[in-house]
Image (spheres, rainbow, N blue to C red):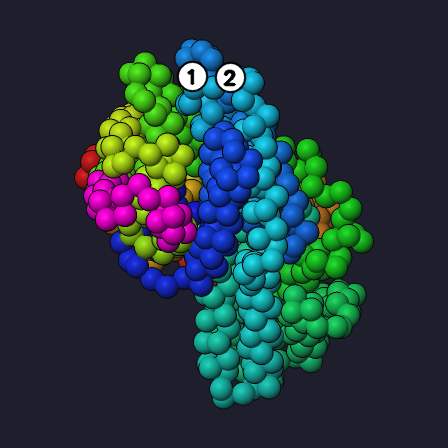
Amino acid sequence: MAIDSPAVKTRRSTPRDWVPQWSAGAALRAIRATLVVPALFAFSVAVIGNLQVATFAAFGGFATLVLASFGGDWREKLRAHFGLAVAGSVLLVVGTVASASLPLAAVVTLVVVFLVLFSGVAGPNAATGAPAALLAYVLPAASPGTLGMVPDRLAGWWLASVVGTAAVLLLSPRSPATALRDAASRSAGTLAGYLDAALRGDPEVQAAKEAAVEAKHQLIDEFTATPYRPTGLAAEDQALDSLVGLLEWCCSVFADTLGEYPDLSRAPEVERELLAETSACLRAVAGLLADRPGALDTGELDRKIEASVAWLRGMASGDPGYADAVHLSFHARTAAFAARAAAVEARAATPGSRRKRFPGSLSLTSLTRVASPQTSLRSVWFVNSLRGAVALSAAVVVAGASGVEHGFWVVLGTLSVLRGNAAATGSTALRALAGTVLGVVVGALLLLVIGTSTPALWIALPLAVLVASYAPGALPFAVGQAAFTVTVVVLFNLLAPAGWRIGVVRIEDVAIGCAVCLVAGALFWPRGARAVVADDLADSFRTGGAYLATAAHWALGLRHDPPAPAAATAAGARLDDALRGFLSEQGTKHVPKPLLWRLVTGTVRARLTAHSLAGLPNPHVEPDPFRLLLGEQAGQLAAWYDHLASRLDRTDHGDVPMLAPPTFPELLEQPGASVRDLACALWVHEHIKHIAARLAELVEPAGVVAAQRHRPWWR
C-alpha cells in the first residue's frame, strides 16, 4: 500500500520520497500503529476468532493511524475520527453491496471515489481523511463478499476506529493550526517592531526589516507546508486563512512605505500617531494569537485614520508640500487599513471567540461557498478527483474481468501510485513494483528462517508494522512499499499459511494496478498541475484586474454599486490549491520558484490593492476630468492584466512579444479636479502609481510560464 500520508508532504520541489529523514511525527505515528494494529489483529484472531473482523480491524487500524492525520485540538480530532468511522462504515456497506456486480461496482466506484476525493475541499481534516475512507470502500468493493459479512466487517472497522482514536488522543503531536497561529503571531510582532524602529528613527531599522521579512517567510512556509490548505470551513479557520494573506500584504506595504520613509521621526504628528496606533494594533494581534491577555480594540485606530483624513482635507491642493503629504497619507492609511483588517481576522481566528461570535459556522452554506468555485476543470481538486475516480473504477473493472485472486491489491496498487502527473505516476509505479519485489524477497527470506512458526510470525508482525507506518513521508517510497508487503505476507500467513507465494500474487496484482494508473494518468492529466497553475494564474490576473478597475471607479465616484470581490477571491483560492499541488509533485520544476512566486505575488497585489480601494468611501460627486482620467488609467491596468492572462492560458502566441506595461505620468496638477473629496481621488492616484510601478517585473516570469505551458507533457 504505502500510500503517502498527506500530512507529511511539503511544497519542496526535491522529491521527499528519495530523501530519508528523521520525522518526529512519523515516529509517533509508527509507535501508535505498532501498539494498536498487531494487538487488534491478535484480539480478532485469538479471542473473537473471525477472519473478517481480523482483516478489517488490521486495515482499519492502518486507515485510522497511518493514512489519516487529523489536526486541531482533542475535540476536533475526536470529531474527525468519528466522522471517518461513520463515513467508512457507510462506504464499507456500499462497497460490499457493489461487489455483487462488476458493472455496478464500476459505476459506484466512479461516483464514490470522486465524492470522497473532492470532499477534501472542506478542509485539511477532510483531505487527510479521504485516503483512509477510500480504504474502507475499496477493500470490500474489490473483494468477494456477501451482505451477511457486513456485521463482521463493521465490527472490525469500528474496533479499529475506537481503539485507534483513543491512541491518537493519548499520543498526539502539536496541532498544525497552533503552529500556524504562532507563526502569524511572530509575523505581526516583528512588523510592529519594524514600524516602531522607523518611528523612532532607529539606525537599526534595516535589521528590524530583515526580522519582519524572515518572520513572513516562516509564516508562508508554515501555511504552504501541505498540499492542501491547513484551514477548514469553520469561521475561525477561514479567518486564519485570510489573516495569513493580510500579514503578507502588511509586510509588503510596510516595506514599500519604509523604503521611501525609513525615518518617520520627522513625519507630521498626525501621521506619526496613526502609524504608532497601527503598530499597537499589530502588537495586540500578536498577543491575541499567542493567547496573551490584552484588549484588541480597533476603535482608536479608526479615530486616528479619521484624524489623518481630516488633516489632509484641511490642506489646500496648492499648499507647499501637499503632494508629499498625500503620498505619505496614502502609505500611512494603507498600512493602517491592512493592520485593521488583520485585527478583525485575528479576533475571528482566536479559538476562544469562535464559540461566542460564530456559533454553527460550519454549515452547508459554507461548504457550498467553498466547493462551488472548485467545480471547474481549472481546479486541481476537481481534476484530481475525476482522474482518481476514473483510475480506480478502471482498476475495479480490470480486477474483476481478469479474475485475479486478490482484486483488492489491484485497486490498492492503483491508489498507491496515483500522482499529480503522468511522469510522476510512472516513476512511482516503478518504485512501487521495485518495493513490492523487495518486500517479497525479504518476506521469503524471513519465512525461510522462521518457517510458518506462529510465535515467530507474531514477533515479526510488530516490526513490519513499525517500518510500514513510519515510512510514508520519511523513507523512500519503495522502502514503505516493501515494508507493507512484508506486513501483508506475515498477516496472511497468520490467517492461512501460504508461505512466500502470497507475495508473488501481490506483485502481479500491484503490477496490474500500476498499469491501470499509468494509462489513466497519461489520458486524463499528463501535465499534472503545471497547466492548471497557468490557467489559474490567468484567471487570477483577469479577475484581479477587473476587481481593481471596478474598485477604483467606486472610489472615484464613477460607479455607485459596491465592487464585488467574489470572482477574484475564488480565483485566488483555486490558484493557491493548484500551486500546492504543483509544488508537491515530484520531479524537476522547469519554472524557477522565484519567478513563479513573483507571478503569484502579482495576483495578490492586484487583489489586495483593489480591496484597499474598495474600502474607500464612495464620493457622491459629479465626474470631473481628473477622476475620469484616473478611471481610464485603472481601465488600462485591467486591460494589461487581461493581456498578461492571455499569454498564460491555452493559446500559444508563438514568438509574438508581450505588450509593455502601461506607464502613467506623475500628476502634480489635478486637471479639472473638484475640491470636494479630492483626497480620495489622490489616494486612488497613489494606488494606481504604486501598482503600475511593479508591473514590469511580471513580464519575464509570465514569458517563462507561457513557454513551459506549451512544452510536450513528456518533456
| Residue 282 forms part of the magenta stretch | no
Q: Position of residue 342 (x, y in %)?
A: 64, 61
State the predominant SS element of the stretch in magenta: helix
Q: Which residue is more in the foreground, 673 or 90?
A: 90
For marks 2 and 1, the one nearer the N-term is 1
Amino acid type for the residue under numbered disc 2: Thr
Crowdedness near tag 2: few (<14), some (14–19) or many (≥20) residues, C-alpha within 10 Å? few
Q: Position of residue 352 (x, y in %)?
A: 75, 59
The circle drawn on residue 146 is 2
Left or right: 430 as drawn, with respect to 6: left
Looking at the rendering, the stretch of residues picked out in magenta corresponds to: 435-464
Q: Position of residue 249 (x, y in %)?
A: 54, 60
Q: Secondary structure at mark 2?
A: loop
Query: Can you see residue 255?
Result: no
Name the residue at 56% across, 74% down.
Answer: 190
Find residue 512 and report its image quarter: top left
Relative vertical location of residue 545 with respect to residue 305 in this rendering, above or below: above
Q: Which amino acid lies under the numbered mark 1 shown in the image of this protein?
A: Ala
